[in-house]
Image: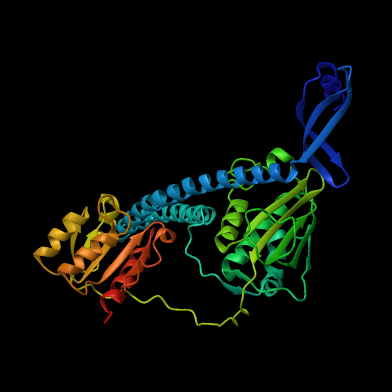
Amino acid sequence: MLAQYRRAIETGEPIDFEFNGRYAIGDVIRQIFVVPLRGLDGRVEQLLVTGIDLTEKRRMETALREAQKMEAIGQLTGGVAHDFNNLLTVVLGNLELLDARLTQDSLRRYVIAAVAAAQRGGQLTQQLLAYARRQRLTPQPVDVNATIAAMGELLQRSLGGLVQVETQLAPDLWPAVSDPTQLELLILNLAINARDAMPGGGRLVIATRNVPPDETGLPPELTPGAYTLVTVTDSGTGMPPEILERALEPFFTTKEPGKGSGLGLAQVYGLTRQFGGTVRLASTPGTGTTVEVFLPRAGARPAEPTKTAPRSQPTPRPGAGRVLVVDDDHPVRAVAAGFLAEAGFSVVEAGSGAEALAILKDGPVALALIDFAMPIMSGAELVRLARALQPGLRVIFVTGNAESLPTDALANGESLLTKPYSKAELLHLVHDTIGKV
């Protein structure tokens, strides 16, 4: 900074520069303006120095760039997951059709192995959709403390004997807006990540507290309000700044190939954003990592959990009636048609909305199975026109991305089937929908 002052004195011209300083309160960024003041003889006698604090502005700019990057990655990820679900529907559907035709048990093991791999692919798409905030969730008031307390045995079993798990739960914790199952998954993901960062063992602390609306220093993407905070801290290896900056990106991992998908933290981030919260990371190499999960405070108390008896899987009833299957993707359409034909239904296929309307003009159908996202004419538009031809038409919408459906998509009694699906899932829904009064 002294060099800048010297230059202003020597040139006699105003200058400005950015200054980065480290103080007890933290790093500070200032824009400094230096104006030379001349005496009667024209020589510079004084300097007028003015500083503007840019620390918060730079922090907000960085946060905005990060939010824009994460949003762009989320949109791309959601699109990939949607297309992947279409592929998995074809793979799993054809494997199921093949399995029903196999006469040699020695060959069935290959089908079983392929199905297991495809199902793992389905789990992967669910993680991708969680990151992209396109899952269909059921946000509700959740007792976070009770959820964490109930996970004690699961966490210790998952983390092993080398990791000491400690909880510090605020006694007056507010209920949070979340999904009970997804909250468990979120905490388990963070705990397993922490375990991997402590290969020789260590200490994992899960803490909770209330964040009042007037608290300062919150992540800028949060809307003003009250939050319930879950903090997961480990004593592991920590992360340098360049790794920390990318830790929430999907598929980014420092683990060896085959040791992790890089979706754990990304899934946590996506879930919290979908609930209206966010995630903030802090880490120091050699010291450990802290993950802060902000969840909006719920306005009501959590409902008491209800226990339901496990449902048996009923045997699909033989089909009856004419079913129209509409999908612009021929292999996906063929899987659905194959499942229905095997169940005894009379199946007609259409590759577009126009083809479907032409079929409906020729005669009634008992049910229409319609892909929601089709080019030229969407599933919703097709249903509107189809019901002008056949009032009361029963409809099942099929989608690979349920969260992308408009809120009023099922307003007229339509059912929903999410890709990939099994033969049993399809037939149960078809029978239930046909049976609606």
Query: The C terminus appears in which quarter of the rendering?
Result: bottom left
Q: Quadrant of the N terminus?
A: top right
Q: Residue at x 60, y 42 (%)?
A: 65
The part of the image, by quadrant, that contains residue 358 is bottom left
Q: Is residue 259 left or right of residue 345?
A: right
Residue 139 appears anywhere in the view: yes
Q: Provide residue 89's location: percent of width, then percent of height.
A: 36, 55
What scheme was used to colour the molecule?
Answer: rainbow
Which quadrant of the figure has residue 101? bottom left
Residue that appears at 75% across and 62% down: 215
The location of residue 178, given as percent across then percent down, is 59, 68
Residue 270: % across, % down: 56, 55
Residue 229, image x, y percentages: 71, 64
Farthest residue, direction left: 362
Position of 353 relative to 40 (above/below): below
203 vs 132, nearest the viewer: 132
Going by the image, does 70 lie left or right of 25?
Answer: left
| Image vertical order of residue 311 relative to residue 386, above or below | below
Residue at figure coordinates x 15%, y 68% from the top left: 389
| Near-viewer residue (403 or 193) | 403
Q: Residue furthest front?
A: 40
Residue 250 seen by the camera = no
Left or right, 200 with reference to 255: right
* Residue in view at x 33 percent, y 75 percent: 315
Please count the marks in the image: 0
